[in-house]
């Protein structure tokens, strides 16, 4: 639990009202979760907490640059990420996760750990198709080991076979029946 301290906010001494915190995002966050989704991260997470007698509302705004590997060429590239999320913490007698963004926390909770919430927000903001900016996205892209000449020869052979099939005498007889 000590490893997650940089992403924890002490709430025991906070007065009711609005509070703002800024957390630096670094490789340390990725190491906490042994992440292979990203190579590196830099940026900040701004937490705006609104504390009341019965709950805490947290607005998390991420502004980060993430190093990713291209799915196609395995080259590293930088992806800029901006995202926003609201999370609610309701005071209770025990800890319970009710929804992805709704938690029950004990009244005597001294701090809130945002490491998992921030990591999940980053992971969900990543693009599903990761392409280096220099790579063009083509829908009909295919890979082969054959040279272009071999491919052209195969296409010519297929065209000749199609022509031969078109002049099949059995079909000619059937066409005359119309």
Image (cartoon, rainbow, N blue to C red):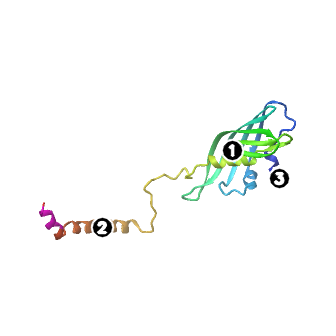
Neighbor class of circle 3 (other Cα within 10 Å; few <14, some 14-19, many 20+) is: few
Please state which of the two labelled residues, at mark 1 or mark 2, is closer to the viewer: 1
Q: Which residue is mark 3?
A: 1
The answer to whether residue 15 is above or below residue 119 is above
Which of the two discs, 3 and 1, labels the residue nearer the N terminus? 3
Instruction: Tell me the residue at 46%/63% (across/down).
Output: 143
Residue 78: x percent and y percent?
Answer: 62, 49
Q: Place residue 58 in its image quadrant.
A: top right
Magenta residue span: 171-177
Q: Quadrant of the C terminus?
A: bottom left
Residue 154 is covered by the magenta coloring: no
Q: Place residue 156 in its image quadrant.
A: bottom left
Neighbor class of circle 1 (other Cα within 10 Å; few <14, some 14-19, many 20+) is: few
Q: Place residue 75 in its image quadrant.
A: bottom right
Viewer-proximal residue among 177 and 37: 177
User: Residue 158 has which mark?
Assistant: 2
Instruction: Tell me the residue at 62%/53% (across/down).
Output: 68
């Amino acid at each position: 639990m000590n490893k997650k301290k940089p992403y924890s906010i002490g709430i025991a001494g906070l007065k009711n009202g609005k509070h703002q915190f800024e957390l630096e995002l670094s490789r340390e966050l990725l190491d906490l979760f042994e992440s292979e989704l990203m190579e590196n991260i830099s940026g900040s997470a701004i937490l705006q907490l609104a504390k009341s007698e019965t709950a805490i509302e947290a607005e998390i705004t991420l502004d980060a640059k993430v190093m990713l590997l291209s799915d196609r060429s395995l080259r590293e590239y930088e992806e800029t990420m901006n995202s926003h999320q609201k999370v609610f913490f309701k005071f209770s007698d025990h800890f319970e996760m009710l929804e992805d963004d709704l938690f029950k926390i004990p009244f005597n909770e001294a701090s809130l750990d945002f490491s998992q919430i921030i990591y999940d927000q980053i992971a969900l903001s990543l693009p599903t198709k990761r392409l280096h900016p220099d790579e063009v996205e083509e829908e009909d892209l295919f890979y082969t080991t054959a040279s272009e000449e071999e491919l052209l020869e195969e296409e010519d052979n297929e065209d000749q076979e199609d022509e031969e099939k078109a002049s099949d005498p059995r079909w000619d007889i059937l066409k005359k029946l119309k």
